[in-house]
Image (cartoon, rainbow, N blue to C red):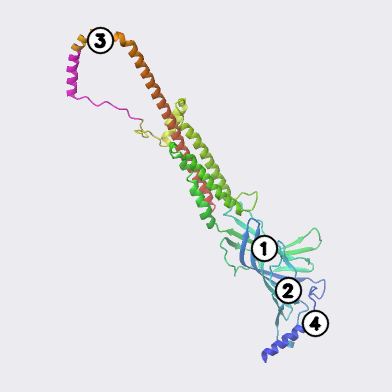
Amino acid sequence: GAWSAVVRYAQKLLTDLFANYTNALRPVEDTDHIINVTLQITLSQIIDMDERNQILTTYLWIRMVWTDAYLTWKKDDYDGLDTIRIPSSYVWRPDIVLYNNADDQFSSSMETNVVIRNDGQIMWDQPAISKSSCSVDVSFFPFDAQQCRLTFGSWTHNGNQMDLVNALDSADLADFVANVEWEVLGMPAKKNVILYGCCSDPYPDITYTLHLKRRASFYIFNLLIPCMMISFLAPLGFYLPADSGEKVSLGVTVLLALTVFQLLVAESMPPSENVPLIGKYYIATMTMITASTTLTIFIMNIHHCGPEARPVPEWARRFILHYLARICFVFEVGENCFTGTPKKQAPPESPSDHNKRRKGSLGGAEARGRREVVVSVQCVCQHQALRRNIEYIASCYHDQRSTQRRTGEWRKVAKVMDRLFMWLFFIMVFLMSLLIMGKAV
């Protein structure tokens, strides 16, 4: 019976309140009065952040509170009933919209009930999935921070008819569901009063600025670290032997692998003049690998120079073969960083060998005396032909030794340059990796 009485009084209150009520006009007793609307936003979840289309999708709880001068009653007349909940379409509602809405359907809010108190205060809570435009700056991707603004205001009422009031200094984040990619640093609120060019009346709005910071762990382990590991393979191309035939192939393979990573990053980024930080790293690494491949081709040409090559210039012999070779620890067999190539020394002569050599010399003197006449006659005939043959053999041997020495010097020049560029490119890769990882700290 008590519940039936409550229902009966609620029906009577609803009938009495809306007997002569219209929801088409502002609920003020005087048209010169300003109706104050208190706005409060609760951020529940970040659904999506589309960097390419620059659209932020969020799940919000929107609370609006205002006073309706025509929806008041004395609770004693209705058995102490002080609140009533009815569909929001029954009462006048402020036309507050999201100015930077990017939803093509404009139907993301839900029709919920309003709570009316006996003093005329109306509280309207509605959940909404909003799509708002957000200017995304990817200059420091994946170590970037974004600021997305959500501006709420009346679409038709100016500041002389309806005023907006902040319920809190910032949005409520108590019920926020953590996002796997973005960390929310804060969402402060600020009231603005703007004069548009079309109208002379002021239009108030409340702007919530959502401060986001990207969680870069996913991109570090899936884009940066593989790129760094591939980049460290490029200087090793200088360490490969020139006769292996794989020096240029290694550089081209590394370049193609980095191109694939570059395409993955470009697909997720918006077309912009600001090149992402990771994109700059990829471009710098690809430029370095292109330069290393070009230098490898140049060094291989030096290594495989044929017998027709000119001798190594004196400045190159002094600077590269002596100075740089010691710095880069390039030595021939038997050399070290302190001494040159050791010279072979004849073994010491034993006393027995000395006596044999002395007896042989005495006996040889007698034999030579007997053979001098015969030999002198034979040498006269064969001297000229033998001399020409010996000179020809000596000339060929001298040319062969000169060619081998010249080819060996050019190969050593190529080897020294390989080692020099290997250490230089290792240092460059290390410094670039250190700079890009320093942004994550």
Q: Nearer the viewer, mark 4 or mark 3?
A: 3
Q: Which residue is mark 1?
A: 131
Residue at coordinates 19% horizontally, 19% vertically from top-left? 357
Mark 3: secondary structure: helix
Q: Nearer the viewer, mark 2 or mark 1?
A: 1
Q: CA distance from mark 1 to mark 4?
A: 39 Å
Whether residue 293 is in magenta: the answer is no
Q: Over which residues does the magenta segment extend?
A: 341-365
Helix, strand or loop at label 1? It is: strand
What separation in Å lies between label 2 and label 1 (alpha carbons)? 26 Å
Marks 2 and 3: which is nearer the front? 3
Q: Name the spot of residue 409 as percent of width and height, x first.
A: 42, 29
Q: Which residue is mark 2?
A: 66
> Residue 87 placed where, x, y %?
72, 77
Task: Please give the residue where the numbered disc 3 appears in the rendered image.
Answer: 375
- Of the numbered discs 2 and 3, the one sitting upstream in the chain is 2
Instruction: Identify the mark nearer the N-term, 1 or 3.
Output: 1
Callout in the foreground (1, 3): 3
Looking at the magenta stretch, what is its main secondary structure?
helix
Q: Which residue is mark 4?
A: 19
Q: CA distance from mark 4 to mark 2?
A: 21 Å
Residues at marks 2 and 3, CA–CA distance in whole angstroms: 137 Å
**Earlier residue among tags 2 and 1:** 2
Secondary structure beneath label 4: loop
Q: Amino acid at mark 2?
A: Trp
Q: Quadrant of residue 193?
A: bottom right
Sequence-earlier tag: 1 or 4: 4
Of 423 and 167, the residue lying toward us: 423
Closer to the eye: label 1 or 4: 1
The percent coordinates of residue 132 (x first, y second) are 68, 61
